[in-house]
Image (cartoon, rainbow, N blue to C red):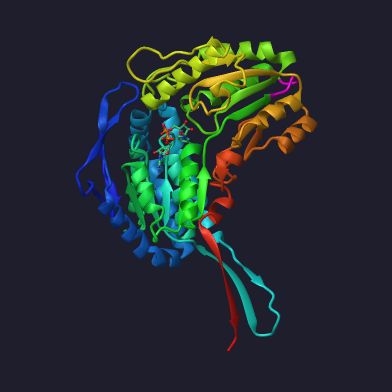
């Protein structure tokens, strides 16, 4: 099943101009799983030429036509799901179930943006004199550079590409070098759906070289990045120097506030499922569990038993619930964060170690007694680690939730409507889900505050990122 993934330039799949490529690794076996082509400056120039030269015609294409391409691409992705999902699993490690979910979610994103294409409404402003029309149009901002990470290569790309194409922008997508087929399948579906040549290019290579070339380039008018806060701040500064707007979807350290009035078992069951999804390599992954002390011990014990029972294995095998970490960097990061937490007095309730020495498998881990000074209480673990902390009341939980500079997702569980609204009003977060997990659908806003970034990649807000307002005053001659 190994794939040799090429660049998509000028409507064709091509090797990089210097013929360089990088190997792909299956994180479940450690075996080579194909290669990905590396773009050089000459290749980026081809992508820039395409994005620049086709911008005006794509922007002026009927929004109904732009929507038709997106809708057809969504259909193609659904038709191809049996071919796509195993490759996502092979390159990233997620289970086949999760891979199929991602393909379907990508198709849903395209469906949503296909409809939004024709709703980029402007407005008419009453004029001061007769015979004057004052019109505020929304129009496409220009060619976009989109940077997509490896955890949800297809789903994250769909949010950027779907909204940008719907708005009338052309796009150069920098895909994830470790999981490149995710973006390649998406681009192929759009090409097969009739997207004109040059409107969308796909490149891979050395991320810093590509961003340093594309972001300042005068053809590029908008940047959209998903990844770590550290890289995001670096790219935001670069974009600022060149007066380019940027959408930033960065890391998180999601708090989960658990009030003493909840039914413990269903809450623990739900949160175990969400915590260990994609091995915790999810920016909205629940991480700091802030539990009222009256139920702390029972909640921790229930959660721990369920976590220990999560079946870890090759994501392509039937029955696997949690696959391997996506790369060796994450394995090393988990080991370092846990060792640091233990050295600060943290206790491992379950897990805490790598499984075997083939593939990047790691035990579903639960820790208690980790002091706030430990690195993991401050840095995004991005792995299968849940941190449990008792709180004396909900105000203390809100304080702890807001202690970090992250503000992406937050979760809360309580039967009290009053408490729920106090939590929703006071936790500093871009997304809050109470008594269920209801975030990340294409029709709802998706994004963070504080160090988790700015801008939204879902809902009607997602289109705004790719539109500018143009005012036209038209006096009748
Ligand atoms: P990293 O910080 O090196 O890279 C994160 C992402 O940014 C990758 O996709 C990478 O290709 C890209 N990147 C790095 N330097 C870049 C540059 N100069 N220009 C453009 N793109 C650049 O770390 P990593 O090991 O790949 O990922 C681990 C960390 O990244 C995690 O701890 C997590 O915080 C974060 N992350 C977040 C998300 C998310 O969904 N928000 C996704 C993936 C990774």
Name the chief secondary structure element in magenta: loop
Taking the image in four quarters, ligand 1 sits in the one at top left
Q: Is residue 261 within the magenta segment? A: yes
Work out whether residue 398 can be spotted. Answer: yes
Q: Residue at x 44, y 67 (%)?
A: 60
| Residue at the far left in the pictured view | 19
- Front in this rendered view, residue 72 or 168: 168
**Residue 363: x, y in percent?**
46, 15
**As drawn, which residue projects farthest toward the bottom?**
477
- Image quarter for residue 378? top right
Query: Residue 421: x and y, percent?
Result: 76, 35
Residue name at image x 39 percent, y 20 percent: 318
Q: Vertical placement of 354 versus 166: above or below?
A: above
| Relative to 194, residue 458 above or below | above
Q: Does residue 431 appear left or right of residue 29 in this picture?
A: right
The quadrant of the image that shows the C terminus is bottom right
Q: Does 458 appear above or below 475? A: above
Q: Is residue 91 magenta?
A: no
Left or right placement of residue 55 versus residue 347 in this view: left
Q: Nearer the viewer, residue 338 or 184?
A: 338
Q: Is residue 31 left or right of residue 135?
A: left
Q: Residue at position x 55%, y 43% from top? A: 453
Residue 469 percent across, percent down from the top left? 56, 65
Q: Position of residue 17 (x, y in %)?
A: 21, 49
Q: Is residue 286 left or right of residue 153?
A: right
Q: Which residues are magenta?
A: 258-262
Residue appearing at x 50%, y 43% in the figure:
233
């Amino acid at each position: 099943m190994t794939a040799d993934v090429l660049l998509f330039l000028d409507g064709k799949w091509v090797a990089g101009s210097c013929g360089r490529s990088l190997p792909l690794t299956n994180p479940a076996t450690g075996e080579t799983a194909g290669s990905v082509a590396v773009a050089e400056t000459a290749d980026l120039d081809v992508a820039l030429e395409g994005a620049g030269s086709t911008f005006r015609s794509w922007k002026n294409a009927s929004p109904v036509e732009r929507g038709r391409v997106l809708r057809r691409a969504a259909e193609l992705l659904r038709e191809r799901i049996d071919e796509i999902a195993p490759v996502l699993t092979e390159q990233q490690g997620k289970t086949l179930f999760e891979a199929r979910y991602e393909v379907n979610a990508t198709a849903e994103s395209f469906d949503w943006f296909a409809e939004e294409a024709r709703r980029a409404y402007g407005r008419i402003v009453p004029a001061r004199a007769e015979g004057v029309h004052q019109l505020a149009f929304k129009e496409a901002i220009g060619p976009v550079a989109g940077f997509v990470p490896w955890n949800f290569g297809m789903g994250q790309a769909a949010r950027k590409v779907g909204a940008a194409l719907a708005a009338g922008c052309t796009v150069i997508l920098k895909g994830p070098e470790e999981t490149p087929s995710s973006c390649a399948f998406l681009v192929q579906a759009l090409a097969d759906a009739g997207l004109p040549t040059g409107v969308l290019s796909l490149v891979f290579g050395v991320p810093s070289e590509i961003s340093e070339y594309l972001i300042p380039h005068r053809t590029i008018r908008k940047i959209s990045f998903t990844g770590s806060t550290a890289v995001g701040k670096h790219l935001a500064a670069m974009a600022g120097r060149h007066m380019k707007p940027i959408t930033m979807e960065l890391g998180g350290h999601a708090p989960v506030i658990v009030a003493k009035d909840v039914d413990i078992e269903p809450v623990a069951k739900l949160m175990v499922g969400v915590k260990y999804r994609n091995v915790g390599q999810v920016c909205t992954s629940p991480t700091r569990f802030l539990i009222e002390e009256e139920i702390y011990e029972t909640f921790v014990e229930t959660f721990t038993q369920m976590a220990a029972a999560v079946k870890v294995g090759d994501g392509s095998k039937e029955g696997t619930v949690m696959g391997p970490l996506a790369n060796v960097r994450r394995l090393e990061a988990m080991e370092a964060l846990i060792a640091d937490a233990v050295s600060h007095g943290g206790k491992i309730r379950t897990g805490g170690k790598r499984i075997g020495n083939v593939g990047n498998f790691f035990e579903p881990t639960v820790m208690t007694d980790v002091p706030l000074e430990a690195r993991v209480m401050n840095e995004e673990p991005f792995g299968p680690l849940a941190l449990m902390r008792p709180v004396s009341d909900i105000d203390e939980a809100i304080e702890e939730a807001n202690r970090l500079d992250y503000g992406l997702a937050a979760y809360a569980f309580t039967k009290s409507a009053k408490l729920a609204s106090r939590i929703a009003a006071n936790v500093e977060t871009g997304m809050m889900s109470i008594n269920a997990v209801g975030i990340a659908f294409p029709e709802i806003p998706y994004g963070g505050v504080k160090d988790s970034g700015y801008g939204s990649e879902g809902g009607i807000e997602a289109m705004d990122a790719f539109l500018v307002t143009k005012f036209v005053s038209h006096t009748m001659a």
